Image (cartoon, helix red, strand yellow):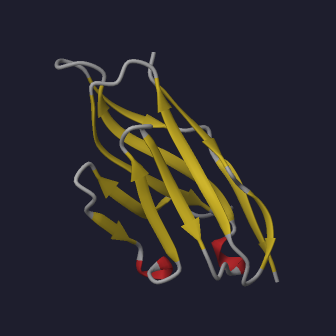
Amino acid sequence: QVQLVESGGGLVQAGGSLRLSCAASGSIFSINNMGWYRQAPGKQRELVAVITSIASRNYADSVKGRFTISMDNAKNTVYLQMNSLKPEDTAVYYCNADLWSDVANEYDLWGQGTQVTVSS
């Protein structure tokens, strides 16, 4: 059973920083990409950042220059360093992974979500 476990959310003042972590555990053969999405109340889930196994990164325009995504391949863990946080960054952040548990089974997994609240 492969699963994603997130950590690192919380409450921070505007201008502050938070670091989110997401670890994939279980039988993992390879990871294609991992990323972070977020969903604010009343809004659709949106992509925040994604990183591939060869470290190619893509960011939402709203977070470019403030957020950094990285991945530790040895630990099957993705991180999201969030700096200069704004109240509009407030949302539930979800980790996502596209991975293979073996040569025949590919999964698109989601974490349980972690709340990030930025106060003004």
Extreme residue toward the left, this view: 103
Extreme residue toward the front, this view: 74
Residue 50 image position (x, y, % from top left):
37, 59
Please tell me which residue is depicted at 39% across the width and 41% down the height of the picture: 97
Q: Quadrant of residue 5?
A: top right
Please tell me which residue is depicted at 53% across the width and 60% down the height of the picture: 80
Please tell me which residue is depicted at 51% across the width and 55% down the height of the picture: 79
Residue 68 image position (x, y, % from top left):
47, 69
Q: Quadrant of residue 116?
A: bottom right
Q: Is residue 113 visible?
A: yes
Position of residue 89 in the picture relative to residue 27 (left or right)? right
Residue 77 image position (x, y, % from top left):
47, 43
- Of residue 97 and residue 30, the one placed in the foreground of this image is 30
- Of residue 53 and residue 93, the one placed in the foreground of this image is 53
Please tell me which residue is depicted at 30% across the width and 21% down the height of the picture: 101
Image position of 53 with respect to 120: above or below = above
- Of residue 45 and residue 67, the one placed in the foreground of this image is 67
Image position of 1 with respect to 18: above or below = above
Q: Is residue 44 visible?
A: no
Position of residue 59 in the picture relative to residue 13 (left or right)? left
Q: Quadrant of residue 115?
A: bottom right
Q: How many marks?
A: 0
Q: Quadrant of the C terminus?
A: bottom right
Q: Quadrant of the N terminus?
A: top left
Image position of 36 with respect to 108: above or below = below
